[in-house]
Image (cartoon, helix red, strand yellow):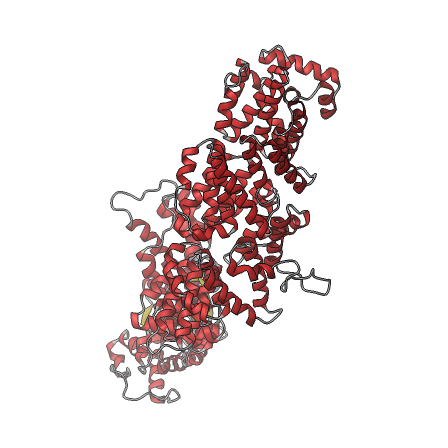
Amino acid sequence: MLVERDQEIARLNRLLFEDAREGSRIAVIGGAVASGKTALLHAVTDTAGARGVRVLPAVASTSEQNFPYALLDQLYQGMPARLRHARPRPVLDAPPHSYDPDQVDLPLLQEFHRTLEELTDDAPLLIAIDDVQYADLPSLRALAYGIRRCRSEALSVVATRGALTGPAAPALDELLHRPKVCHVRLAPLTVAGVTTLLTEELGAAEAERHAAAFHDLTGGNLLLLRGLLDDQFSRLTCGPLDTTPGTCAPAPGELFRQAALSCVYRGGPAHHRIAQGIALLGDASSTPLLSKLVAVEERQVRHAVTALTDVGLLRGAHFRSDEVRTVLLDDLPGDELGTLHHRAARLLNEEGADPLDVAGHLLHHEPAEPVEEWIPQTLRDAARHAVAADRVELAVNCLQLAQRCTTDERETLILQATMVEAMWPFNPLSQMRRLQSLAGPAGSGQLPPEYAVPVLLRLLTLGQTAEAAAALGRIGRDAAPGSELDTTLRTIDLALASTYPGSPELRTFVERAAPDGPRAGVPPTAEQTPESPQLTAGKALRTVLCHGADDQAVQAVERVLETSRLTDATLPTVQAALQALIYADRLATAATWCDQLIEQSERRGATAVLASFHTLRAQIALRSGRLPDAVRYAERALEELPARGWGVTVGMPLAMLVGAHTAMGNHDTAAEILARPVPEEMFQNRYGLHYLYARACHQLATGRQHAALTDFRACGEKMAAWGLDSPATLAWRLGAAETWLTLGSQERAARLAEEQLEQTGQAPSRTRGAALRVLAATRPPAERPALLEQAVSVLRASGGWYEMARALADLAEAHKQLGDLDSGRLMTRRALWLADSCGAEELSRSLQRTPGRSALSEAARTGEDTTAFSELSDAESRVAALAASGYTNREIAAKLYITISTVEQHLTRVYRKINISQRRDLPASLEFDVAHTA
């Protein structure tokens, strides 16, 4: 049973030297390695010597376990010289042949019994044996024979015993498991015990603070604790121990590692081998696997695991400290370690273990020639699992080792393709040469379809359309209807139709993606399997691009985003879903999702993926009218992935930059961006459309109307030919209409604006608001305010802040032309504030040149003297904001559910606090709050 250490010596002394009982007295001290058994044994023998008791000491050892009577010889050495004539003479060299464990030397046993009787006649006798579990079998039998027959009360026996397996176990049980034998088992220290020990070394405060951590690393084992404490002291180069709070936290070092090794060695060779096997596998969860690895019986493995747990090295199936695992592996010779790693890999593979676990052992020791067939395949599978877990370095290491281990040409190509896919999200530029080398094998069928398809899609981004199209066509013809490959190809058809609709070589894929095409899917019935997220996202994007915003499509992609975790495999699905939201002008929702995806990509370190999401975020910002944000995100995209890494998709980040800089009035910067070389193939895809549209806007803004008109028309022709002529894609008609206005052709401009309005429908949208603004410019002055007010209302509802600033600026001008200067000034202030907030510097400068702007409105715009604004209560701020927005007192009362009289009282207090005298001097900044929240 478990007893307190301060009671153990007294208890044993009473048992061995004081209690009156017939016959010999035996005590066994048990416990894990380094639990203090030997120290307790020495304390008992010291007490015995002080009391005049003769002590016969002996220490059993594994090195002497096969030498008959080695332990008995030690006992005889402690006897008087007159009795040593009967001592056995064990052979000190290795015996020439193994002795018979059942052989009994009866005369020797009888002589040993007579010797004990003679010694106990003279004085009390204590036989003290340390590590009795390692005693040789003949000695154990002699001890059992002599002690059992000695009836003297003067004989006492005390022994320490650790774990034991092997042929000596039955004899040891015969000696020590008798009715009157007292068993004392030493338990490891509890946290309280560790606290007591640490208090002596570190002081009470640090002991309380760190005792749990010391116990966690050592399990309360005294030897490990001492090693851990000695490491603390050894780190001090001079002076006393620094007990500053926090400095005494345990940090295993060399002395702890040596203590751990000592604990393992004390268990014997098999114990040591099993511990190394656990270190190599990482845990002891599988006894059969561990048994096969170290070639030790399962019974011994279970016994060793229990012993290692008792000693404080293991907790559950794992080492408490990684330092223990490290030192055990370092203790293995290099060649033996390599052999064990290879054997572990083979055993794990045979058991169907996770390929990553198998690969971990193969990577530690490169397989020797000839390489077994299963190794390259397992490494490839491990690489695939590593990529899925975002462990790219591990994936690359697995693939590189697999390539060194295979001579099969087809397997080499598969490994090359896998390497491209593993590295592309992180560093596509590093894989360009390898990708190009795979073009031929992917096109000729040397690569299996599941590896060829990703390669071909990468080649498309490099502009190698003809080769990729031919190979994809061949793969599609061979795909069985309804197969996983067929589903993948249907998704690819949709992606190609949405992204590369202008490539003649891909026309077949575009036609197949049409609603009535040969690969068109039918809506799933209750009995059918629901379509995959890839198909759902692809169809939704295609629908929005072809027909404009669609509520069902938006709901579908929101479900896809909610249920899809971002991985390399789901990236195309997630991007398609996000783009559908952007083109449908669900910009707030899209921004939320995109920010989350950017954060996830940054954590992964996937620079190419991060660049693509920054581009989408730039598109969101540009469509929202957040021009500086659009520049920032687009520039970040090109920083993460240089232009040469984008291939034919570079048109998108460049288009966002040009569009934003043009709207801001940075025309020189936009011109510099447009001067950069781009692939000609870019103009056959959707990203080229955006680039063409942005270039047209820049040309219009810089006075090159005919060049702008050419590009706008080219945009429209391509969109119509590709089936993408919807208001969600690009409003090319409005660009052309504005160009015609600058050329003096209001009739043509009006016709294009009306076509755009007819296309957008009645639902509020950014494009509809912009169309109303352009249409107003084609009407007589008296008709313009009504159309522009409608445009402002639509744009406020849809969130197009830059377009709203332009509409307000036009409305201000319309009021002035009609002689309504007060309304003109109010609209100018509102337009100016919004232009400044959007970063539309050129528009802001043009509005600042407008005469009649009050000093107070300028102060409000620039943020000067805002102390008075902060004195407004929430209720006053709401009333003032609505009044600044042009609402009447009656409308404000209805909107805020208060009386007209209350509105008047609030406005009176507002005028007094901000020192104005009339409604039209209310700051535009108050109106801006309403514009963003109404």
Q: Is residue 321 visible?
A: no
Seen at 64% across and 45% down, the residue is 549
Q: Is residue 361 visible?
A: yes
Question: Which quadrant would residue 63 be assigned to in this image?
Answer: bottom left
Q: Is residue 243 above or below residue 68?
A: above
Q: At which x and y percent is residue 737?
A: 58, 36
Q: At which x and y percent is residue 258?
A: 32, 61
Q: At which x and y percent is residue 736?
A: 56, 38
Q: At which x and y percent is residue 16?
A: 41, 67
Seen at 40% across and 88% down, the residue is 102
Is 589 left, or right, of 683 in this rendering?
A: right
Q: Is residue 141 above or below residue 816?
A: below
- Counting the numbered discs, the total is 0
The C terminus, quarter of image? top right
Question: Which quadrant would residue 507 be assigned to in this image?
Answer: bottom right
Q: Is 768 in front, or is 375? A: 768
Is 98 left, or right, of 647 in this rendering?
A: left
Q: Is 547 in front, or is 232? A: 547
Q: Is 532 in front, or is 163? A: 532
Seen at 43% across and 37% down, the residue is 670
